[in-house]
Amino acid sequence: MGNNELDEASSDKRDRIGFGGMITIIGAYFAKVLTAVVLGLIKGFRFIFTEIKELFLLFAKAVRWIFRDLSAPMKERMELNRELQREMRAAKKESPEAYSAASKKFWKSYLFGKSGLVFTSLNYLLPIVSIIVLVNVIRYGSGLEYGISVEYKEKELGVINAEADYDEAVREVRQRIAYLDSEKENVDLNAQLSLKLISGGDKMLSSTQLANEILTASDEELTEAYGVYIDGTFVGAVPDKDAVQEALDENLLKYPIEGVVKDVSYKNNIEYEKGMYLSGSVLDNKQMIKLLTSSKKKKAVYVAQSDDTSATIAQKFSMDVNELEDMNAGLSKKCRPGRLVNVTETESYLPIQYTREMELISFLDYETIEVETSELNLGARETLVKGERGEKVNSIEITYVDGKEYARKTVKSKITKVPVVEQIGIGTYTARPYSADTKLYGTGQFAWPVDGGWVSDVFISDRNHKGFDIAADLGTDIYAAGDGEVVSAGWNPGGYGYFVMIDHLDGYQTVYAHMSQVYATTGTTVKRGQLIGAVGSTGDSTGPHCHFEVRYMGICYDPAKFMYTADYTEDMDLSERTTTAVVTDEYGNIITNETTTVTAVETDESSESTKKTTTKKTTTRKTTTKKSSTKKTTTTKTAVEQATH
């Protein structure tokens, strides 16, 4: 049987199987798959069970080995005991003396033998006892406290926690000595320090207490008083700290401050330490109060600001204007910004600080971005959205020291006006007349709708023309002149041929007529520069062109008033053409007609040569004249410009 016959037989067999047979085959296939899965699971469980069994056997062997190793000495001991007991029974039969000797041998071996009771007990108990002893030693050692014993002039003053306490005490002693007599700064204050186990009778000292002990151990005359420290620096001692503090508090209350402020306090930290001080460093309360509330004048240099005058500068530094003039000749006549002004500042021994809360408005700069838009012709730049600075209200706290600003901190900020991003439009609309001489100076509301072309007939003209005609090659693209909705697209039997009408939703409508093809669809939305059709000569037309109309509330207006092409360059002169550029005034009257002949020659691109263009331009200017209520316009046109509606 040949291959062809076998294939036919197989085909006949499949045909005979039918739908039921296919279900049977599929069921058998799934049964095989399920069987394979079940067998795989069984093998997996069997493998896991085997591994667990092996682990259990290994564990059992380990337990047996440990038990055998631990029980071996006991078995030996029991075997030895049985042997000794047999000997004792045998000796008992022989004689009492032999029995006594066998008994002694038994008990000696049982108690003090190699595997006897004492030896075995020591083997187990000694490690346990050692561990207990070690733990107790560690606990005892960790519970001990150590300190540094200070011995000065062969006398133990006490115990401190760290050497830093001793250094701080020495510094404190030197401050107290130097306050009275600078020559005593070289007094020997060296002490012997040693590590010591602290006991219950030891005297623990702080750095201040150690300083008092060192002074007490010296030969100086001492008095118990309150040391006054300004930012940690000793300035003297007083008998009564409360009287001094009350005077300082009263000084704060009397400080002249205008407006509402908070946290009025001294800039420096004032502390009192009770201890032993040199008698000569102890001032009476009035002397200390006079010192702490005193002030002095010092010379300084101030940089004049833009709004400064001699009067404002004098006010800032609480100076007399005449005094300021004496220090800076001619300041009242010439106080320019940046001038260095000599002033005197009042410096308090304890400057007073306070905080004033204010709300200040700051401005946020806006960002400038460039946006490509078809609303502008290619290369044109225009501000689409003018940037505006934002505003932010800052709640700040200004700290003043002796009436002058010392620091400021922003507590919170709230933006009350978000900056408006300035958008600079970069024109991308490329549709333009063939010639750069076609200059229209309208508002730019609508774009030039044809990719090239030239004005072949203007608005009104000599035949009540409702728009103007843009002549171009057949099939040239036509674009929407602005955003809007297509309200009509297709064939117009009234002479427009294929056309598109766009409603710009602001009262304006534009019409594009005589198309060869219509790409837009009625009811769709289009954007400025979107392709809507192609130049043709359908309907009432004598040549390929786009009849373009601008209507407002149903009334036709001159399209030139709404288009701006003056910013186009001459890079669109693509071929030899004879064109007429028409420039109109604001009433739609023709100001000039320019007839231009352009010849463009391109070299072969494969030779990588540059493009060369030769332009021959002949211009004929015609001016519109007005007489009373009539207008007469004379226009020169070539044959190609007769493509009109």
Image (cartoon, rainbow, N blue to C red):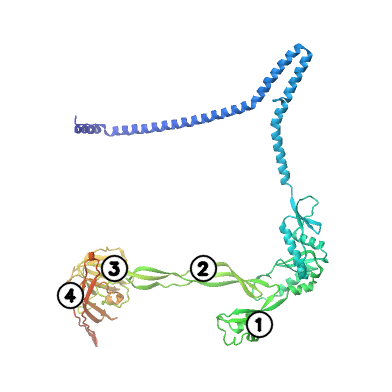
Taking the image as shown, residue 312 lies to the left or right of residue 383, namely right
Q: In the rendered image of this protein, does residue 315 appear above or below residue 220?
A: below
Circle 1 or circle 3, nearest the eye? 1
> Is disc 2 in contact with disc 3, using a CB cutoff of under 8 Å?
no
Work out how far the residue at label 1 is from the one at label 3, CA to CA, in angstroms.
75 Å
Circle 2 or circle 1, nearest the eye? 1
> At numbered mark 3, what does the secondary structure look like: helix, strand or loop?
loop
Q: Which amino acid, mark 4? A: Gln
Q: Write down the residue under mark 3.
A: 480
Work out how far the residue at label 2 is from the one at label 4, CA to CA, in angstroms.
64 Å
> At numbered mark 1, what does the secondary structure look like: helix, strand or loop?
loop
Q: Write down the residue under mark 2.
A: 415
The crowd level at tag 1 (other Cα within 10 Å; few <14, some 14-19, many 20+) is some
Q: Earlier in the sequence, mark 2 or mark 3?
A: 2
Q: Write down the residue under mark 4.
A: 642
Q: In the rendered image of this protein, does residue 310 appear above or below residue 395?
A: below
The x and y percentages for residue 239 are: 80, 68
The x and y percentages for residue 438 are: 26, 76
The crowd level at tag 3 (other Cα within 10 Å; few <14, some 14-19, many 20+) is many
Q: Nearer the viewer, residue 264 or 180?
A: 180
Q: Residue at x 54, y 72 (%)?
A: 361
Q: Earlier in the sequence, mark 2 or mark 1?
A: 1
> Is disc 4 in contact with disc 1, using a CB cutoff of under 8 Å?
no
Q: Write down the residue under mark 1.
A: 319
Q: Quadrant of the N terminus?
A: top left
